[in-house]
């Protein structure tokens, strides 16, 4: 499980040829990389944001000046646009994000994580809903009681006494 998670995270975060501008923007430092993710998150969620909003969203990773520098670099690269006091994602950024997302979700390690997560979810749902399955013995599609259910039902009381 841990290996599956680790490999998927590494695959998702790895720089790729499909997003050269994003690689330049994020690759300046690990702190700037984190700030770039914070900026991306808020601009994907709400489309536009002021420098104050971007600074607030990235406060764990850098100062207002650090965020301002990262935003300015994003504008210089053509990834961000400024309209008045609002910033937004450029068409180039959206295109690179789309390409990057497609390449990442198709990576074998990310696919393995998705399959693993789905399998765990299915098993948990079956376990949690087992008691809701039809156990009426008179019903033609009823499944047999499990041994535990039969014992709890009193079917083996004579054998136990």
Image (cartoon, rainbow, N blue to C red):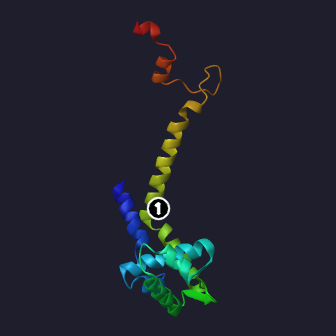
Q: Please say if 104 is above or below 160.
A: below
Counting other residues with Cα less than 10 Å from the Cα at mark 1, is it few (<14), some (14-19), or many (20 or more)? some
Q: Quadrant of residue 83?
A: bottom right
Front-most of residues 112 and 30: 30
Residue at 35 percent of width and 56 percent of height: 2
Q: Please say if 33 is above or below 84.
A: above
Q: Quadrant of residue 91?
A: bottom right
Picture quarter with the C terminus: top left
Q: Is residue 100 visible?
A: no
Residue at 43 percent of width and 82 percent of height: 26
Q: Quadrant of residue 130?
A: top right
Q: Residue furthest bottom?
A: 76
Residue at 41 percent of width and 81 percent of height: 32
Q: Pointer 1: what residue?
A: 111
Residue at 46 percent of width and 23 percent of height: 148
Q: Label 1's element?
A: helix
How many numbered circles are shown? 1
Q: Residue furthest left?
A: 3
Q: Is residue 156 visible?
A: yes
* Rendered location of residue 43, percent (x, y): 58, 76
* Rendered location of residue 158, percent (x, y): 45, 6
Front-most of residues 99 and 53: 53
Q: Please say if 73 is above or below 9.
A: below
Front-most of residues 80 and 71: 71
* Rendered location of residue 96, percent (x, y): 53, 81
Q: Is 134 displayed left or right of 65 in the figure? A: right
């Amino acid at each position: 499980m841990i290996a599956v998670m680790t490999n998927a995270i590494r695959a998702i975060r790895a720089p790729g040829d499909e997003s050269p501008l994003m690689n330049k923007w994020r690759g300046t430092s690990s702190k700037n990389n984190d700030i770039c993710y914070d900026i991306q998150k808020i601009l994907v969620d709400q489309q536009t944001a002021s420098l104050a909003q971007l600074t607030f969203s990235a406060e764990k990773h850098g100062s207002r000046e650090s965020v301002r520098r990262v935003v300015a670099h994003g504008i210089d690269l053509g990834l961000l646009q400024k309209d008045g006091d609002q910033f937004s994602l450029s068409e180039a950024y959206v295109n690179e994000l789309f390409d990057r997302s497609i390449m990442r979700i198709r990576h074998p390690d990310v696919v393995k994580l998705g399959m693993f997560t789905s399998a765990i979810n299915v098993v948990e749902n079956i376990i949690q809903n087992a008691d809701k399955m039809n156990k009426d013995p008179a019903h033609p599609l009823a499944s047999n009681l499990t041994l535990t259910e039969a014992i709890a039902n009193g079917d083996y009381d004579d054998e136990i006494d």
